[in-house]
Amino acid sequence: MLEKLLAEGVNVFRFNFSHQDYDNAAAACKNIRAWAEKNKVHVALFIDLQGPKIRIGKFQNGQIVLQPGQDFILTIEDVLGDEQMVSTTYQPIVKDAEPGHIILLDDGKLRLEVLRKDKTKVYTRVLNGGVLSNRKGMNLPGMKLSTPSLTDKDKEDVLRGLRMDVDYFALSFVRTAQDVLDLRSFLRANDSEHKIIAKIEKPEAVENIDAIVAVSDAVMVARGDLGVELSIEKVPSLQKDIIRRANYGGVPVIVATQMLESMINSPLPTRAEVSDVATAIYDWADAVMLSGETAMGKYPLETVQLMGKVAMDVDITQSERKKKLLMRKTHFIQENSMLSSLCDSADELADELNAKAIITFSDSGRTPLLLSKYRSSVPIIAISDQLKTCSKMALYRGVIPLLCHTPFARMSGIKQMLQEAEQRSKEAALLKDGDLVVIMAGIPIATAGSTNMIRVHRIGTPY
């Protein structure tokens, strides 16, 4: 199935280490890399770290029924639960909880209000009851949690991920920019410059979104826990705002959770789900992500095909005026004024000349990322001599990474670079003789940050 999903154009694969078996994940990672190499495409891989997952313990009979108005106790002691009490994995709850705080169980289906606490127990009253079974999740909106976002398990999983050769790590339950910096410090302590995706799913993260964006390599609108921790009716407006701020900060933004949820069991989605996917793309998200639909659904291939069709239709109908208004306000572009001016000019040229593509060269991926934020109407062919850069760029909207045959440092000059780009693009069936392209390059070659030239060229003609 992995090969079929790749053939349908999946750019990025996520390994959820809340549930994933390491050996299976490593094998899947190896298979994806082998397929990508065989078919000369680039795919980004990322590990979704579990973070401080807070759960209740187990019940004597597997489950209980809580009635509205009854008293119920959460304890840090290791006990089997019953109708009066259950244990929790979150030991600091007796420190963090205060009277009036709300505790949500099982994705918010059950609500408890904190009445009081002692050294080992938190005493609550049930506001919304229902069936509660073993090891259900617990959310603590409004509480300033004592536990770090990066847990000991996460650190072990990061080390496993480094051995798996993934490209990104997604940090769960981010609250502040320091959480991201802590993960970056851990990566650097292990000689790694891997990229970090900050998952926005806590109220504190929403409050600190600009600072988090500034230190992250990408962000994810994780709508599952976000809709539990905050009022669910706020999720659409928060999604728009997070996307806007990520674009303003110049980082890719992913929208995730329940995009085509009904396709877990149905070959067709609801009309509302299709509109949901389209809205995220209209709002300028860089990527839309599937979860249960492909992880355990009955129709993973059909789901990917449908999402691809929606994305293509939206790309065709995107508003040019809206694109330009968005980009003129982008802080990232203002901070990279010379390069952004070149990117703006290349984008305008491609539109006016009806070019087939924009070709750019990059060692780090910086120029293709900036170009992607202009939401060009043509593909951005990004040539790099770094395999890891090619994989990383698979997340960038509208960017097609290609690995060149010759390292930049060994090329004789700009002419050889342009010839290499043309050859690789034709080999990948992206361009053919007669196609008009806009080329961005830098002189001197093989120098980071040297992009300083725009050239219009017709494929198949002399340079």
Image (spheres, rainbow, N blue to C red):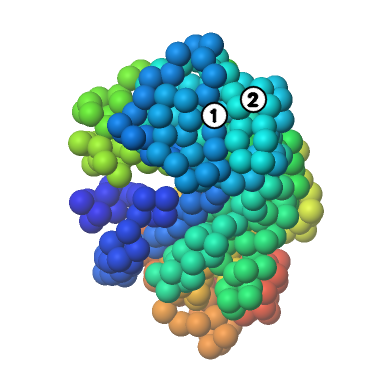
Task: Give me the residue at 50% from left, 60% from top.
Answer: 153
**Horizontal side of residue 26 vs 157, given as left or right:** left
How many angstroms separate mark 2 from mark 1 (CA)? 9 Å
**Horizontal side of residue 185 vs 173, given as left or right:** right
Residue 27 visible to the viewer? yes
Q: Position of residue 385 (x, y in %)?
A: 50, 76
Residue 146 higher or lower than 363, as above or below: above
Residue 245 visible to the viewer? no
Residue type, numbered disc 2: Val
Q: Cβ–Cβ below 8 Å for labels 2 and 1?
A: no
**For residue 114, which numbered disc appears in the image?**
2
Task: Give me the residue at 42% from left, 34% from top.
Answer: 81
**For residue 388, which numbered disc appears in the image?**
none
Task: Identify residue for label 1.
Answer: 73
Instruction: Report crowding for label 2: few under 14, some 14 to 19, many 20 or more residues within 10 A (C-alpha).
Output: many
192 or 393: nearer the viewer: 192
Q: Position of residue 38 (x, y in %)?
A: 26, 69
Task: Give me the residue at 69% from left, 60% from top.
Answer: 181
Q: Position of residue 33 (x, y in %)?
A: 33, 67
109 or 458: nearer the viewer: 109
Instruction: Report crowding for label 1: few under 14, some 14 to 19, many 20 or more residues within 10 A (C-alpha).
Output: many
Q: Position of residue 47 (x, y in %)?
A: 45, 57
Numbered marks: total? 2
Residue type, numbered disc 1: Ile
Question: Label 1's element?
Answer: strand
Question: Label 2's element?
Answer: strand
Residue 269 higher or lower than 59, as above or below: above
Nearest-to-viewer mark from 2 and 1: 1
Mark 2 or 1, nearer chain start: 1
